[in-house]
Structures are given as structure tokens and as C-alpha cells.
Image: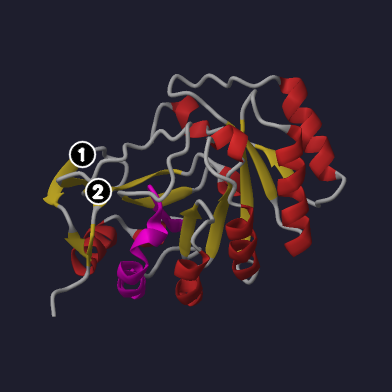
Amino acid sequence: MSPLTAPIREIFSSIQGEGIFVGCRQIFLRFAGCNLTCSYCDTPRDIPEQCYWEKRPGTRKFFTSPNPMTAQDVALILRELEPSAHHSISLTGGEPLLHALFLRELIPLIKGTRQGIYLETNGTLPAFLKPLLPFIDIIAMDIKLPGTAKVKPLWDEHREFLELARTKNTFVKIIVDENSKMEEIEKALDLICDVGDFPVVFQPVTTPDAEIKLSAEKIITWQSLAMKRLTDVRVVPQTHKFLGYL
């Protein structure tokens, strides 16, 4: 039987720029491919012929390997990046859960970080998450507002996903911009509160040149609304774009 493989875009060490763990040092394992086409996405949608990987953490010296890659090949690269010096390994994309079978094989091979495995996901593939739950430590789940992301409504998928994710250290990101609709934000908060009191991060869309196209008045209003119902509500832009360092 041929080994499982997956298309990997990048493997590197950097600073987490989003969510409640902003500023933590992570190893990023970025998968290619996604099941959504969000309007604000800044990740290429192609399947690259090569994976770019950093040999030593923080050096920005990259090597290449042909895609797709085996779990064993990826694990060898991750071990070279000194997992013990990192908060966690971030499984990101694209959408990493599209490669759930590959992750089931890979994750047991990658140990030694301080806080384990961190999954960054669009929160729309609950059937793919369920068998991986024993192997995941932290979940950063997006809720996609239809009017902001320009995607079909995904409320049912998000609810089922969050019901599963509640057993883990999970927080929710709501990505917003000037055109986000109050009724959709309220619906997202209803969904979250129905499942549990999760930390919530309002993440303003940040352009590649570190510009936030959202008024302070709007984001403060939305945060105030959420704080009436949830314990931990934060506003965190994509800080890595301000640093100019991915």
C-alpha cells in the first residue's frame, strides 16, 4: 500500500499573529487546498509543485521538497525545527482538515512542543474533525459571516463543529470588516452561546500592507454586544502583518 501523502505549502517557525495566543512562537505546517473561497483570503489556492521548508527556526533559509509529501518526510522536517522551543505546532492552510487521514498518521509522529497541537480551521468539516479530536490540543475555529466572507451560510456546519470542539481548548474567531452585518454577528453570538462560553476574538480584516478597513466605533459596538453574553471577548487584528513577518 502506498503511503498517505498531502500537498504542503510551507513549514516554518514564526510568531502566531492571530487569536488568543497571539505572540506565541509556533511551528507552522501550512496545507494547500480549501473547501471555501472567502473573499478576504490571503492564501493562494493553487496546489504547489514544491513545499518550502525552513531548516533552522527563524533563519528564513528555505529549502524545497516536491509535493505531495509523506507524513514521515514532514515529521523529519518538523523535528529539525526544535519543537521543544515552541508553544505548539499550528496545522493551518488552506483547510488542514481536508487532509484528516494524513493528519491521523502524522500527529503521533510529532511530539515535544510545550502545548501540543494547534488546529486552525474554518469550522465547517465536523465529520473530519471527530476522529482527530484525541490528537488535537487547541482549536482556533472561524465562524464565517456570509456577508463578510461572501460564502453561503454555514450555520449548521459551524454549530455541529463547535459541539465537537467544546471538549478541547477552543476559541472562536469572527472575521469582520466595514460591511459586516449586525444581524449576522448576532446570529454568530447566538450560535456560540447556545453551545458554551467560548473565548471569542473579533478579527478585523487586515490588508497585506497592514491597513484595517473598519471603524473603531463599529468594532467597539460589536465587542460590547458580545461582552453582555460571553466572558472573554477580544479584538485582535492580524498582528503579523504589522510586523511584516510570517
Nearest to the observer: residue 81 or residue 132: 132
Q: Quadrant of the C terminus?
A: top left
The residue positioned farthest toward the right in the image shown: 228
Q: Residue at x 18, y 64 (%)?
A: 73
- Left/right of residue 169 with respect to residue 36 in the rendered view: right
Q: Residue at x 15, y 46 (%)?
A: 50
Residue 212 part of the magenta segment: no
Q: Residue at x 61, y 34 (%)?
A: 147
What stretch of residues is rendered in magenta? 88-110
Q: Which image quarter: residue 204?
A: top right
| Classed neighbour count for the residue bearing mark 1: other residues with Cα under 10 Å, few (<14), some (14–19), many (≥20) | few
| Classed neighbour count for the residue bearing mark 2: other residues with Cα under 10 Å, few (<14), some (14–19), many (≥20) | some
Residue 134 picture location, percent across and down: 49, 77
Task: Classify 224 as above or below 139.
Answer: above
Q: Are marks 1 and 2 in contact (CB under 8 Å)?
A: yes
Q: Which image quarter: residue 185?
A: top right
Amino acid carrying mark 2 in the image: Arg
| Residue that mark 2 sits on | 56
Residue 199 picture location, percent across and down: 70, 52
Residue 189 picture location, percent across and down: 75, 48
Q: Which image quarter: residue 110?
A: bottom left
Residue 82 picture location, percent across and down: 32, 58
Could you give the CA–CA distance between mark 1 and mark 2, rounded to whole angstroms? 7 Å
| Disc assigned to residue 61 | 1
Helix, strand or loop under label 1: loop
Q: How is the image coloured?
A: secondary structure
